């Protein structure tokens, strides 16, 4: 029987786009499955080496011999060097539980697992960065950036009044979203730069800026105009976080913290709540960024504020011994556009 209701021509592009998305998703799942199998294979090899060296008393020379034999047997595979076999041994030693490996670190490419092993000192740190990398889809370069700039120590470190001004369930997530200090070395401006110079540089490097702000942020505008009672007011920087479902007002100060800065920011947050946010958005957050944050004074100042506000320092230049190890702006922006997860 002939089909009396053929597919309308105009629906073909939408159907094709849907098929492409499904194929790409399937390819990604396939790559991740291959990666998981490879990491588990490396873990099993490392566990075998540990067992034979521990129980049977085999010495270090067994790794040299194993590297030669496996490389000869599988010449197309590049993972059986002596160095990588030693990493496999360390990997199995750090993560002795096979089920835990399958549930967490096997979801990461081998290159990222090597970063966790070689660049971090404690298991707690490794678990934290592994979980964040999986949650946010970090590439190897982005992971290294976050490790080298001590993201874990900076997250949730800002002075805020979130606990007093937000529901408990929202307060903790909002607190962890705010850092202290923020690292803006990628802006390429000197420590003497004025606020407008810093804002200009932020808009030029908005991709890197969003990465430093954290997951879920989108740039909503600079010098955003809001009219109140016939007067024009201008918000330095406005962002929206789709994970928090709320706006973030950023007030930038090129000097040290002063209590009067918070009163101005409190006013701007109120304006956004009244004039910009929709009924579906949650209450707006404020973030005051200054070169030097006097924490005790900041804590006292926030007690009198009606809006949820955080106060943090920012750094425009990093010490040379740290900066030289960080990936370049070009590398970061390239990685943010996607990397082969098998690397």
Image (cartoon, rainbow, N blue to C red):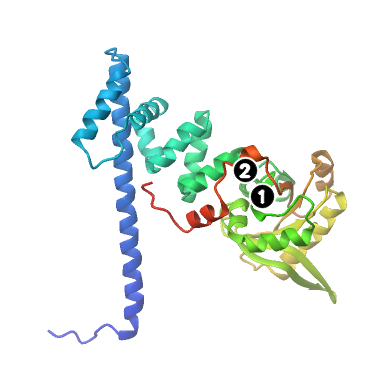
Residue 181 locus on image (x, y percent): 69, 44
Q: Residue at x 31, y 25 (%)?
A: 47
Tell me the crowding category of disc 2: few under 14, some 14 to 19, or many 20 or more residues within 10 angstroms, Cα based: some
**Residue topped by disc 2:** 323
Mark pair 1, 2: CA separation: 8 Å
| Camera-side residue of 231 and 109 | 109
Identify which residue, 295 or 343, lies in the foreground. 343
Q: Is 324 left or right of 191, judged from the image as shown? A: left
Q: Quadrant of residue 103?
A: top left
How many other residues sit within 10 Å of disc 1, few (<14), some (14-19) or many (≥20)? some
Against 139, residue 19 (above or below) is below
Percent x, y of residue 317: 70, 46
- View extreme (left): residue: 1
Residue contact at pointers 1 and 2, CB within 8 angstroms: yes
Residue 158: x and y in percent read: 71, 43
Left or right: residue 279 versus residue 269 is left
Task: Report the residue at 30% width, 85% height from top.
Answer: 8
Mark 1 and mark 2 lie on one chain; the one further toward the N terminus is 1
What residue appears at the point 80 percent right and 57 percent down from the top-left corner? Answer: 194
Of residues 2 and 33, the one nearer the viewer is 33
For disc 1, the marked residue is 185
């Amino acid at each position: 029987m002939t089909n009396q209701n053929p597919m309308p021509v105009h629906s073909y592009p939408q159907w094709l786009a849907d098929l492409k998305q499904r194929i790409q998703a399937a390819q990604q799942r396939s790559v991740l499955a291959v990666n998981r199998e490879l990491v588990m294979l490396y873990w099993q090899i490392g566990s075998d080496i540990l067992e034979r060296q521990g129980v049977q008393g085999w010495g270090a020379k067994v790794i040299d011999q194993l590297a030669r034999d496996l490389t000869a047997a599988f010449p197309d595979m590049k993972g059986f060097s002596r160095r990588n076999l030693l990493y496999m041994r360390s990997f199995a030693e750090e993560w002795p539980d096979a089920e835990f490996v399958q549930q967490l670190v096997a979801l990461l490419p081998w290159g990222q697992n090597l970063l966790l092993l070689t660049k971090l000192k404690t298991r707690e740190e490794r678990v934290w960065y592994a979980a964040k990398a999986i949650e946010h889809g970090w590439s190897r370069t982005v992971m290294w950036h976050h490790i080298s700039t001590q993201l874990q120590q900076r997250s949730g470190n800002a002075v805020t009044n979130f606990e007093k001004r937000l529901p408990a369930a929202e307060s903790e997530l909002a607190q962890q979203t705010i850092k202290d200090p923020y690292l803006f070395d990628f802006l390429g401006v000197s420590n003497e730069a004025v606020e407008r110079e810093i804002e200009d540089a932020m808009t030029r490097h908005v991709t890197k800026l969003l990465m430093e702000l954290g997951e879920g942020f989108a740039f909503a505008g600079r010098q955003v105009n809001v009219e109140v009672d016939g007067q024009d007011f201008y918000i330095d920087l406005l962002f929206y976080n789709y994970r928090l479902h709320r706006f973030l007002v950023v007030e930038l100060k090129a000097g040290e913290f002063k209590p009067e800065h918070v009163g101005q920011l409190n006013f701007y947050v109120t304006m956004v709540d009244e004039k910009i946010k929709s009924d579906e958005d949650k209450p707006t957050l404020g973030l005051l960024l200054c070169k030097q944050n006097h924490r005790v004074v900041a804590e006292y100042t926030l007690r009198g504020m009606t809006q949820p506000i955080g106060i943090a320092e920012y750094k425009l230049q990093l010490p040379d011994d740290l900066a030289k190890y960080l990936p370049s702006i070009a590398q970061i922006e390239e990685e943010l556009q996607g990397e082969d997860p098998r690397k």
